[in-house]
Structures are given as structure tokens and as C-alpha cells.
Image: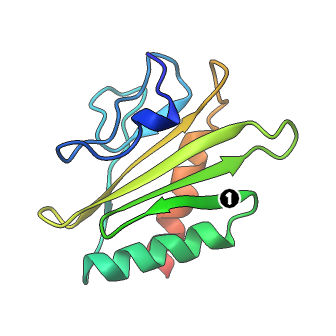
Amino acid sequence: MEVSSEQLGVKEGKLAPCPDKPNCVSSQSTDEKHGMKPIPYNGTAEEALTKIKTILTNRKRTEIVEADTHYIRAEEKSKLFKFVDDIEFYIDTASENIHFRSASRTGYSDMGVNKKRMNEIREAFQNA
């Protein structure tokens, strides 16, 4: 299942599911291939969003393309071929977790790039 940028976003508290390809990770995915734990946060949703925005702004080749009070979508381009990956964050105030999805728009395998990116963002968030 391919997901276009028009299909991204939060629908009934859920981000789009990952496709069958191994080039996507999501904190809302239940399978081992795609699943990662959400990022817990303390404080307000606004503070969590501000931290995520700052982290994304400091990443090279990353641009925030959509943001509201509980959601951020960014695009990050690969260094060499300029492939675009979609990165989404959803602030779940009920569980005090930041759910995310990071997926390559093209290709099959991402060689672990999306998982590595989300681990870097998680670490930066925890250290901010």
C-alpha cells in the first residue's frame, strides 16, 4: 500500500499505516518490522510540539510543511539523490506520548534510515 502526501495526517487518532515495504517505521504499528515505541513527554502538548519543531529545524535537509496544535509533518531529503521522506508527529495528550511515522516515498528498502532518524529525534527530544 502506497501512501501519498494527501493521505497523511491524523484520522481518528491514527497516523497512516506503514506499507508492506521495509522503508517505514511507526509508533502505531504493531508488527516488528515497522513498530517502534512512541516518545513519552512531560509538560504540555505545546511544549512537546515546540521541542519537536526545534529538533526538525536543526536537521539538515528537513522542512516542516504542516503544523497545528497536535500534529507536525515534515519532509526530509536524502543527501545524495534528494529522495523525499515524510515524517509525522502526533501529540497524544491522553497517553502523554508523541506518536510518529517516518516513511520513504520511493523505493523498497531504506537501509534502516527511517529507524535511525527516529532514534536520533527521540534522543534529541530526551536531551532537550
Q: Position of residue 36 (x, y in %)?
A: 38, 43
Q: Is residue 77 above or below residue 90?
A: above
What kind of element bears circle 1? strand
Residue 17 versus residue 108 in the image, above or below = below
Residue 109: which quarter of the image? top right
Does residue 89 appear to the left or right of 118 in the view shown?
left
The spot of residue 23 in percent (x, y) is 56, 28
Q: Residue furthest right?
A: 80
Q: What amino acid does circle 1 point to?
A: Thr
Which residue sits at x=45%, y=51%?
88
In the displayed orientation, state which residue is furthest to the front. Answer: 6
Residue with the mark numbered 1: 62
> Which color scheme is applied?
rainbow
Number of labels in the image equals 1
Location of residue 108 by image quarter: top right
Vertical side of 9 occupied by 6: above or below: above
Q: Nearer the viewer, residue 1 or 127?
A: 1
Q: Residue at x 46, y 36 (%)?
A: 6
